[in-house]
Image: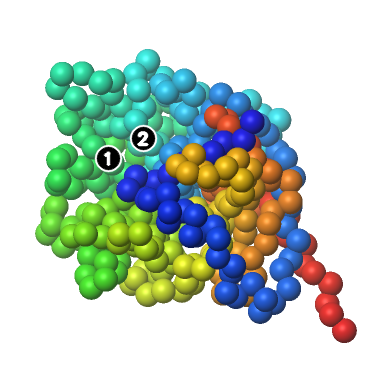
Amino acid sequence: MTRPFRLLPGWPALAWLALLAVVPATAAKAPAPRIRVVPVAGYDAMPLTLDPGGAWSPRGTLLALRRDLHQIWVLDASRPGRRPQKVYDTGQWIRSYGWSPDGGWLLLVVGDPGPTNERMLVAASLAGAVDTLRREDLLAAFWGSDGSIHYQVGNEWRQSLPPAGWKPPAAFVPRPVPVIGGEHLALTLGTGAPGARPPLHVGTFMDDTRRVIVMDALPDGSRQLVSISEDTSAALRVVDDRGRTVTDLRRAGFWPTSIDGDSRMIVGHAGEGGGGEQGPTRTWLVAADRDGRWTTRIAGSEGGTDPQMSREGSFIAFAVGKGTRVAQLVVETPAAHP
């Protein structure tokens, strides 16, 4: 059974139809390579995180998946024969999760619904250490490229120190966390006053009447995949660390969700059949060149949505139904034309 498109909050159904109806403006500029997936593993009871870009470790080929709402398991895509590791389980709802900059810890927002809406901010290492950092009305959190923990309470973003047990590797170089702001909702560097502007992370931001969705961001901050929407129109693009457009995806013909580790490709999903808010009845994965020269359907990906690319290697994880499929992405260069 295929999974219908998951409409993003505030995204009108007509905008989805318009997006899928267009033909890529740049597809004829170069022959598209044949791209296919080679299955690695499948996990029917472990869905991908709803925030694209959050499942893969920023280093290596580790993938974090949630099971039964209150467990986090980590698997190594490069070693499919090795049993996944259970990293965290307290019996409470894991509302969101993401990785530390070095890929050695996971940061989780945990808490069942209750009168006070109190949630825990928990850091769990792959080595088994668990540290509860805060207990309050948390809305979101992420581990920044500066090494600090950034978390949201109400409309305010705050910062705290990482867990005492986190020892960044010698090669770790702290970088400022970009913020959302500036003209046309450009991404600008610098932290600014605490809480003044939301720091850049995968998620949704509002500025006046416009909505910015950061769908993916490379660990080094060099590229972000964003959607800037107002009313029924949306500007889909890949931008650099200063908000400058690298790839214009407004006529991509599919919904992009991830950038590969060296930013050569953008992947996403498309579909046909069905209609209305439920979206298409048939879906598949799509890849596009970062320079807009070609767009192609990924063979062997039928029924897939919401793909995420690993930061190292050529692995891809995507949703099928309520589960996750992990595969290796194989790119075959087309034969040269005489």
For disc 2, the marked residue is: 96
In the displayed structure, does residue 134 sit left or right of residue 25?
left
Task: Identify the element where label 1 is drawn.
Answer: strand
Residue 109 visible in this rendered orientation of the protein? yes
Counting other residues with Cα less than 10 Å from the Cα at mark 2, is it few (<14), some (14-19), or many (20 or more)?
many
Image quadrant in which you'd find residue 333: bottom right
Residue at point 61%, 46% (across, down): 273
128 vs 59: above or below: above
User: Decide: marks 1, 2 in contact (CB < 8 A)?
Assistant: yes
In the displayed structure, does residue 261 sit left or right of residue 78?
left
Q: At which x and y percent is residue 297?
A: 68, 57
Q: What residue occupies the far bottom of the structure in this picture?
A: 338
Counting other residues with Cα less than 10 Å from the Cα at mark 1, is it few (<14), some (14-19), or many (20 or more)?
some
The amino acid at mark 2 is: Ser
Residue 128, numbered circle: none
239 vs 44: above or below: below
The amino acid at mark 1 is: Ala
Q: At which x and y percent is residue 140?
A: 27, 40
Image quadrant in which you'd find residue 171: bottom left
Q: At which x and y percent is residue 269?
A: 57, 51
Residue 140, numbered circle: 1
Q: Nearer the viewer, residue 330 or 18?
A: 18
